[in-house]
Amino acid sequence: MPEDFVVTPWEVRGKVDYDRLVEQFGTQRIDAALLDRIRRHTGELHPLLKRGLYFSHRDLNWVLDEYEKGHPFTLYTGRGPSSAMHLGHMIPFFFTAWLQKHFRAKAWIEITDDEKFLFRDFDTLEDATRVGRDNILDVIAAGFDPKLTRIFLDTEYIHHLYPMAMNVAKRITFSTARAVFGFDASNNLGQIFYTALQSVPCFLESVEQGHNVPCLIPCGIDQDPHFRVTRDIAESLGFYKPALIHNKMMPGLKGLDSKMSSSAPDTAIFVTDTEQQARTKIRDAFTGGRATVEEQRRLGANPYICSVFAYYTYLFAPQDEHLAEVERTCKSGERLCGDCKAELADHVVAFLGNHQERRERAKDRVEEFVVRD
Ligand code: TYM
């Protein structure tokens, strides 16, 4: 049966059925026992974990087994600099910074200017690199510890990546790449090779330390195909398979099956948006409201199809009591969509104000985080 949704590293379309995706991709669900196990190390659980938005993993139990035996793990995540970052792009960075804090883990962060040049319409590679440098400010602003964090742009750090990328690339056939990514004769050579460069950072800590170090990758589930390939070849290179923890894709503002798109700015809040832009986008967002106020007061609204409620759930109601109150008053009809949007807009504007301040301060801190040589 053809799927009514698509999830690849370069395209997410339709209303994603995450249960089916776990089956298709062959990952594991994060269950209550695993949440308890994480909680033993972190105290509180991150809201994204508690709410099932980090929902899937590969080998996370093994990473914790090793950690409990005294073998720390390294974290690895990344960003493909296509434009200013939207709130969805920030999610893995907030979560990785949280993991870093609780596990005192080193984090490697790859900025793939090469990827975005190869896959998007940048006229020049320099344009992609420039966006990459700008996105680094947002990554720093997510709260990483400079002593434990290495951020690099692929084009600047390539001399550390290339020899290992050769070893990875030699082990992946075109037929595998075609089966995993759906490439055809129209793809350029760089696109076909690119997955080697996303694989290499899984092994950088092991290379640096001279012995095998477990690597945990927090990322959106859309990035999993790259690491399925990496996991297949890791052991033949003498490394552990990287482990993963996957988040769901935060929906766009036009409904739960809408996508946040850099090319359609009103579908997402970008971290560089002005207060006015953010308020207008939220005012025009899709909700689960009724046709008239009278009907909504009488019958209540539906938060489970509502983009605005999704925004509360992902980022803007970190306290469980607050989220429960939004949900309850929405369903009962006490809360009207206009008021609910205005409240969300206040939270978003406060978030953007803080983030943009941290982003400004990050301009003086780049050298603490970015590695080149
Ligand atoms: P990119 O720039 O498309 O996305 C950056 C990270 O954000 C996740 N993401 C989302 N999460 C929640 N809701 C959304 N709507 C949403 N949209 C994107 C992505 O899954 C990703 O984790 N090729 C990568 C860059 C990369 C990378 C990595 C990512 C290089 N190495 C290692 C993760 C791990 C990319 O273009 O991501």
Image: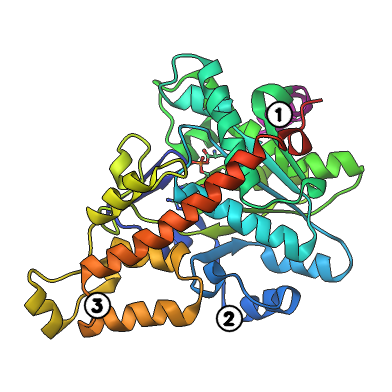
- Image check: 235 left or right of 4? right
Q: Which mark is residue 32?
A: 2
> Which residue is more in the foreground, 262 or 155?
262
Q: What is the CA distance from the residue labelled 3 to the residue labelled 2?
A: 32 Å
Q: Are marks 3 and 2 in contact (CB under 8 Å)?
A: no
In this orientation, does residue 268 appear?
no
In this orientation, does residue 205 appear?
yes
Q: What is the CA distance from the residue labelled 1 to the residue labelled 2?
A: 38 Å
On the image, the x and y values in percent for residue 337 come to 22, 68
Mark 3 sits on what residue?
Answer: 335
80 above or below 23? Answer: above
In the image, residue 249 lies in the stretch drawn in magenta: no
- Image check: 197 left or right of 1? right
Residue neighbourhood size for the residue with mark 3, other residues' Cα within 10 Å, grouped as few (<14), some (14–19), many (≥20): many
Whichever of labels 3 and 2 marks the residue nearer the N terminus, that label is 2
Q: What residue span does the magenta drawing correspond to?
A: 159-171
Amino acid type, label 2: Ala
Label 1 vs label 3, nearer the camera: 3
Residue neighbourhood size for the residue with mark 1, other residues' Cα within 10 Å, grouped as few (<14), some (14–19), many (≥20): many
Residue at image position (44%, 20%) is 122
Q: What is the CA distance from the residue labelled 1 to the residue labelled 3?
A: 54 Å
On the image, the x and y values in percent for residue 159 come to 77, 22
- Image check: 144 left or right of 219? right
Mark 1 sits on what residue?
Answer: 165
